[in-house]
């Protein structure tokens, strides 16, 4: 009974090890979203936090950044924005667990360069250089791999039109619609070469010397 318990414990530890290194586990590592104080963009950040665990949000106002003030981090425990300093953010001391990656949303006009500079404590910083909701969601999909139900929910929330680019492939298979399939090249049988007719040589006239003929004179009968 004791040996059986040890065996079960070992199996459980192995399973825990496998799960701890699974892609799903890596996907749950802390991610920090840095967004300007733009209503739709901030709302999108909160919606991503609903779909994924360990999402941290820092927001800023452009005027505040220019004056060296006004960075805010969302505190999910108190459900309130907490003002922080650039020095706190730059050192990463405000995070109990430092994010594994930072995603900064907004173009260079929307996000002052200093925010990229003070994010250098993280080795994995990505930029989404737009505030257009459709482009932003598509870019976030590359990072979070939204499921079909998540896409439908986001489309409903932000009035987006979904386009299934794989619909035709699932319907017609890998070769596409009938009539649109790429025709396979047909083997070409080489035409046998016609035999080369050699031009007959031009006949050469050879002058044949006629052999001399010795004509014997008939002997006349002797007069007897």
Image: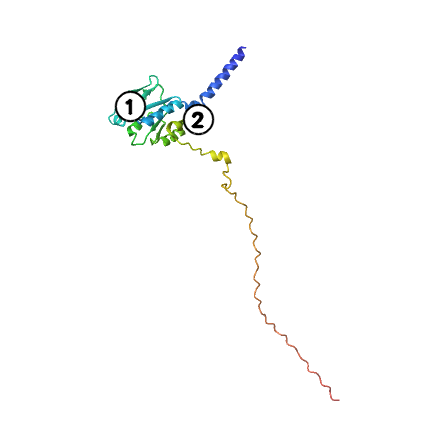
Estimate the x, y position of residue 198 in percent, counting from the top left. 57, 60
Where, quadrant-wise, is the N terminus in this rendering? top right
> Label 2: which residue?
149
Earlier residue among tags 1 and 2: 1
Disc 1 secondary structure class:
strand
What is the quadrant of the C terminus in the image? bottom right
Point 37% across, 28% down: residue: 158
Pointer 1 residue = 71
Closer to the camera, 158 or 193?
158
Could one spot residue 43 in this view of the protein?
A: yes
Looking at this view, is 187 or 52 the one in front?
52
Horizontal side of residue 155 vs 213, given as left or right = left
Residue 30 lies, with reference to residue 199, above or below; the image says: above
Q: Residue furthest top?
A: 1
Whole-number angstrom distance, CA of label 1 to CA of label 2: 34 Å
Q: Nearer the viewer, residue 85 or 153?
A: 153
Q: Which one is in front in this view, the residue at disc 1 or the one at disc 2? A: 2
Q: Position of residue 56 (x, y in %)?
A: 35, 22
Q: Based on the displayed image, in which of its 4 quarters is residue 21 positioned?
A: top left
In the image, 197 versus 60, the foreground residue is 60
Task: Determine the residue located farthest toward the left in the rendered image.
Answer: 67
Q: Are marks 1 and 2 in contact (CB under 8 Å)?
A: no
Residue shown at 28%/23% (left/top)? Answer: 71
**Element at label 2:** helix
Q: Residues within 10 Å of mark 1 (few under 14, many from 20)?
A: many
């Amino acid at each position: 009974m004791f040996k059986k318990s040890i065996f079960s414990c070992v199996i459980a530890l192995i399973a825990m090890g496998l799960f701890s290194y699974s892609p799903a586990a890596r996907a749950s590592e802390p991610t920090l979203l840095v967004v300007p104080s733009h209503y739709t963009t901030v709302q999108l950040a909160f919606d991503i936090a609903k779909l994924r665990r360990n999402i941290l949000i820092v927001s800023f106002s452009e005027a505040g950044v220019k004056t060296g003030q006004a960075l805010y981090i969302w505190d999910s425990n108190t459900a309130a924005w907490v003002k922080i300093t650039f020095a706190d953010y730059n050192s990463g001391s405000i995070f109990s667990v430092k994010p594994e990656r930072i995603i900064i949303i907004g173009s260079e006009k929307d996000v002052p360069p200093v925010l990229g500079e003070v994010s250098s404590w993280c080795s994995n910083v990505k930029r989404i250089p737009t505030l257009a909701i459709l482009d932003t969601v598509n870019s976030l999909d590359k990072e979070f791999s939204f499921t079909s139900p998540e896409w439908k929910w986001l489309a409903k929330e932000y009035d987006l039109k979904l386009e299934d680019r794989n619909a035709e492939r699932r319907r017609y298979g890998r070769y596409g619609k009938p009539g649109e399939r790429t025709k396979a090249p047909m083997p070409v049988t080489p035409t046998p070469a016609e035999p080369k007719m050699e031009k007959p040589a031009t006949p050469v006239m050879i002058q044949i010397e006629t052999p001399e003929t010795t004509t014997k004179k008939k002997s006349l009968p002797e007069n007897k």
